[in-house]
Image: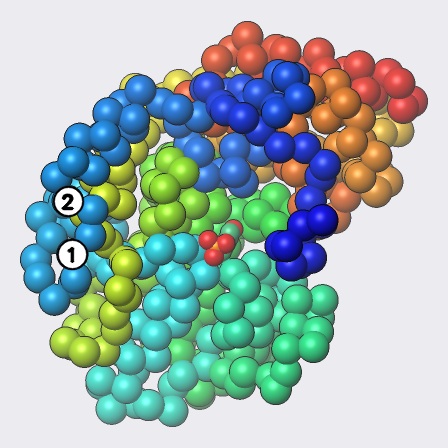
Amino acid sequence: MSYLAKNYNRKKISFKFGKGSYLYSTNGKKYLDFVQGIAVNSLGHAHPKLIKTIRNQSKKLWHVSNAFQIPEGEKLAKKLCHKTFADYVIFQNSGTEATEAAIKVARRYFYSIGKPHKNRILCVKNSFHGRTIAAIFASGSNKMIEGFGPKVPGFDHFIFGNHKSLKRSITKNTAAIMVETIMGEGGIKVIPDWCLKELRKLCNKKKILLILDEVQCGISRSGDFLAFEKSKVKPDIVPIAKGIGGGFPIGAVLMNKKVAAGMTPGTHGSTFGGNPLAMAVGNTVIDIVSSKKFLNNVKTLSKYFYLRLNKLKEKYPKIIKEIRGRGLLIGLQLHKDQSKFIKKLMENKLLTIRAAENVVRILPPLNVKKNEINESLRIITNVCEKLK
Ligand SMILES: *Cc1c(COP(=O)(O)O)cnc(C)c1O
């Protein structure tokens, strides 16, 4: 029997080790891993540079309190700010902590300018911002909040893509709009650039903050370091996590100078957040994934992948409804429930993961090779052929 609580519906498979895009199971089988810990292992498994970093740093220093200065963290924060809109960073350990910290920064900003009544956060109905008590109520998903009342107040919701519902939901108490630039769990739904621009304009007009949750779509996953960059929009606050640690738990909230002014000493903290071991890993990941050459390669591979997937959609129009996403954050939307399709892909040694709206999520490592993409396409074609 298992002594782990039953809160996950786990597949009956476990892995002994991983290398690059592949996972090797305890029963001796090799899988092409296009889950990568849900967009976490951005450089695949057992990347030599990450192994070297962990090895070196682990001999020097793992953890010290945030009561002291941490040069590795200073270094990573500087890189994050130089590469993005941000002026300041707070480090956390996970995505949901990063989104919660983002909410705290937004509320604290209005408090610090003498407008504490502006404390409500407007989110997309059925979005995903993590699993803490506040984050599940931010997500506005009936399934996630079931049994976890009382309701955490302070969140309002609008329907994705419904601009009337968005504008109607802004009140004098709204502090910020928080949306995922590309909805991950919600079904790989991309907010178009023109919408992001309008969103920014709306926030400026209403004098409220724009929080873009890039926990899943950020850190080069979209082909840009942060997914909103292409739109030229500047958000106020951006939580990041998944990809930045390459498998080591790191979260962070990026913010501009204006809102950072509210975060005075004592307002927020984390025992583990930003420890030297985590920061050393983060520095290595960012140096690799944020280079222009690396990003161009993600874009090129992504273009090829979408082209081929769209051809498959044309070939199997009764199975595949739509190809969604950007960069290497890809959603294969099916007409029917996707469980059987994912199971068949796994039987054929390709690992993928579900998202809402019948979507099969495809998340290769960002350094995936073209022949590995081809291998996945062959498996997807086989499964379409069998299920047609
Ligand atoms: C995964 C995710 C989170 C939560 O991250 P955890 O590390 O699981 O807490 C928050 N927001 C988005 C958009 C995510 O995809």
Which residue occupies the foreground of this view, 343 or 196?
343
Q: Residue furthest right?
A: 388
Q: Residue furthest top?
A: 371
Which residue occupies the foreground of this view, 252 or 25?
25
When the figure is inspected, residue 371 is found, relative to residue 178, above or below; the finding is above
Mark 1 lies on residue? 64
**Does the residue at mark 2 contact the one at mark 1 (Cβ under 8 Å)?**
yes
Which residue occupies the foreground of this view, 11 or 240?
11
When the figure is inspected, residue 24 is found, relative to residue 269, above or below; the finding is above
Give residue 280's quadrant in the image: top left
Residue 307 placement, left or right of 315: left
Mark 2 lies on residue? 61
Q: Quadrant of the C terminus?
A: top right
Q: Which structural element holds mark 2?
A: loop
By what rule are the colours in the image chosen? rainbow
Residue 134 percent location from the top left of the image: 50, 74
Instruction: State the residue at coordinates (66%, 38%).
Output: 353
| Label 2 Cα neighbours within 10 Å, binned few <14 / some 14-19 / many ≥20 | few
Residue 257 percent location from the top left of the image: 18, 64
Residue 185 placement, left or right of 194: right
* Residue 322 at least partly seen: no
